[in-house]
Image (cartoon, coloured by chain):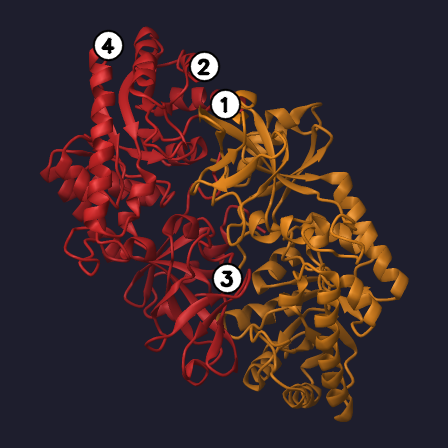
Chain colours: A orange, B red
Amino acid sequence: MDLAISDDQRLHGHLIGRQGSRADLNTPVLVVEADALDRNIARMAALAAQKGVRLRPHAKTHKSVEIARRQLAAGAVGVCCAKLGEAEALAAGGIAGLHITSPVVAAPGLARLAALNALSERLSVVCDDPANLAQLAEAGAGVRPLGVFIDVDPGIHRTGVASPEAAAELARIILSQPSLRYEGVQMYCGREQHIEDFAERRAAIAERTDYLRTVIAALEAVGAPPPVITGGGTGTHRIDLELGVFTELQVGSYIFMDDQYAACDLTGAGADDLPFERSLFVETRVVSANATGLVTLDGGFKAFATEGKPPTPAAGAPDGAFCVFMGDEHTALIGKGVETHLRPGAMVRLNPPHCDPTVEHYESYHLLRGDTLVDIWPVSARGRAR
Amino acid sequence: MDLAISDDQRLHGHLIGRQGSRADLNTPVLVVEADALDRNIARMAALAAQKGVRLRPHAKTHKSVEIARRQLAAGAVGVCCAKLGEAEALAAGGIAGLHITSPVVAAPGLARLAALNALSERLSVVCDDPANLAQLAEAGAGVRPLGVFIDVDPGIHRTGVASPEAAAELARIILSQPSLRYEGVQMYCGREQHIEDFAERRAAIAERTDYLRTVIAALEAVGAPPPVITGGGTGTHRIDLELGVFTELQVGSYIFMDDQYAACDLTGAGADDLPFERSLFVETRVVSANATGLVTLDGGFKAFATEGKPPTPAAGAPDGAFCVFMGDEHTALIGKGVETHLRPGAMVRLNPPHCDPTVEHYESYHLLRGDTLVDIWPVSARGRAR
């Protein structure tokens, strides 16, 4: 085997540009509607530009050099990465302005962070702990200072400092370290992103933004006004732009959408008023059709995010049919008469329940225009969870 | 980047054989206790040999050429694969006697199946549909006949024929096709594997085995006695061996174990009497410790199987501490005083809730003896879900 050729390139590279080649794809396969993706990128860029807010889209969603390039071309100042390994993969693809949104705390990671900082311009990382700041100061003592954002816990206790006073204490240390560059403050309200009702989500995020204002005031009081205030997500982007505290948004899922965000009223005009299009799907096929009212599709726990609901039919299934996971490799499509409409080999397109952990299962995106495969893009940082 | 070097080799290759190198691993990382793995392989081989039953371990669990080699060296007649792509990857690593346990029904897959059959000796695949048999007969019309097992639905309607009569009809067609080799019958009772109580599981599987006897009788009645009767799993292996109907076992998870199987009484002597050792773990690290009674570990939905319960602490955590998922990248470890015992950077070893979809997230196994990394094995068929 030639390791330099991905399995997807081996299976599908020859199909690129061939009319109708969607039907020749081996399934399950992760597909992206290329034009819908482009429109989503342009829409979010326009919203942010209108308000004069920087975009630093979260690359944990796509982990793709190609998609990051398109976001930068649309005006993004860089991209966020959840983990150092993602940042390494994107930097290797020529992406700059990388911000790592989780702390890097252990010796092996700190050595890699120092190496990446020497290679990559405008690199930054969050910090929520004074002992970690000392380690970061060492990592930044090379070619150029390392950028640091103070991470603020919005109340879920995942990461971040626990009080405005703790934030001010970190700022004081950062400003005293010549090998660190004070970038500002980050607060990511993960829990609030998926509150389905707009008014309820707005109230929750307004309350958290009030808290963020107290953090900013504490920073200003010690002579450390944050140059950048970064955070927000697809669920709250309209509210964040309206409240006007964040100067940089870390939106991620807007490029693809998924069932979880499609269930949210993102604009206040109802969940049917989706401001972004679904662009990400998994194409599957029927592999067995011997039962009444049930056929078996060829993707299961290893083909989808599984921490929530199962996927939903997007195309190819009769109205009213629904999915139930059937283990690692299969999903049942259940509905009246499905076994007569959909014989083995029939293609059924499914919506991912949650985009990020669905993408994680795949080596590549298969880009479609209509029924034609137009490109294959690697999931460049696949599995880079460290 | 040199694509021929995996990211794990780049990060950890230099640590192989270095005393105490476990502490230098970047986390989250998938580790295997090498000696426990070897003992598990030997134990199942001995059990099967004692009863004169063939072992064809299921490689969907490990997807690894190295582990398949060890299973073959211990006497296995081959390995099972859930998908054609897994079989291709294992065949490329020199593994023969491959049996594909899900139907291959679509044109692109059938072409690949024909190519693989030309390369790989003793290849077989299941079938549950007469139209598919005609396709398989074409795929087998090359260098050598293609082996076919009749797949029998045990009642969950995932795959398999729905009646003894349907099985007999398929057998008749298989025997009439010179390009097909009649291998026998497969019935996999997936639902029964995880019934935690031994007596309850035994009763369920005995009832299903009675049904399988009626299928076998129907095959014998049309002059098609099955040469091989394949199925079973780690949950039912003792019962399958005792009932004596299966002539070949497809056990998979016994090599690693996981929380789901550890909760089952596998021998009838209680769930504490684990006949196999846990050999698979995920090493994680604390990345944030600012809350009372909670620290944050660096693996989440992208580091574990997520369709069931969260992982559990295996080592490094205080007694009574437990885990809660905190999104794509993080898991909370909750317990009295954890934030004082475990500061950022501290390693915590977790048990995977379910082995197969946990492995799927990783590029490699990191083999440990004590605290020393002794080897890195690729997850050869990672992501080969098609």
Q: Is residue A56 visible?
A: no
Rounded to the nearest angstrom, the CA distance separating label 1 from label 4 is 26 Å
Crowd tier of the residue under label 4, counting other residues whose Cα lies within 10 Å: few below 14, some 14–19, many 20 or above = few
Rounded to the nearest angstrom, the CA distance separating label 4 from label 2 is 20 Å
Rounded to the nearest angstrom, the CA distance separating label 2 from label 1 is 9 Å
Q: Examine the image and state in which quarter residue B104 appears.
A: top left
**B378 or B5: nearer the eye?**
B378
**Could you tell me the amino acid type at mark 1?**
Pro
Q: Earlier in the sequence, mark 4 or mark 2?
A: 2
Kindly check if marks 2 and 1 are in contact, taking CB atoms under 8 A apart as contact: yes
Q: Nearer the viewer, mark 2 or mark 3?
A: 2
Q: Is residue A142 above or below residue A39?
A: below
- The residue tagged with tag 3: helix, strand or loop? loop
Crowd tier of the residue under label 3, counting other residues whose Cα lies within 10 Å: few below 14, some 14–19, many 20 or above = many
- The residue tagged with tag 4: helix, strand or loop? loop
The numbered mark at residue B300 is 3
Rounded to the nearest angstrom, the CA distance separating label 2 from label 3 is 43 Å
Chain ID for label 3? B
The numbered mark at residue B131 is 2
Q: Earlier in the sequence, mark 3 or mark 4?
A: 4
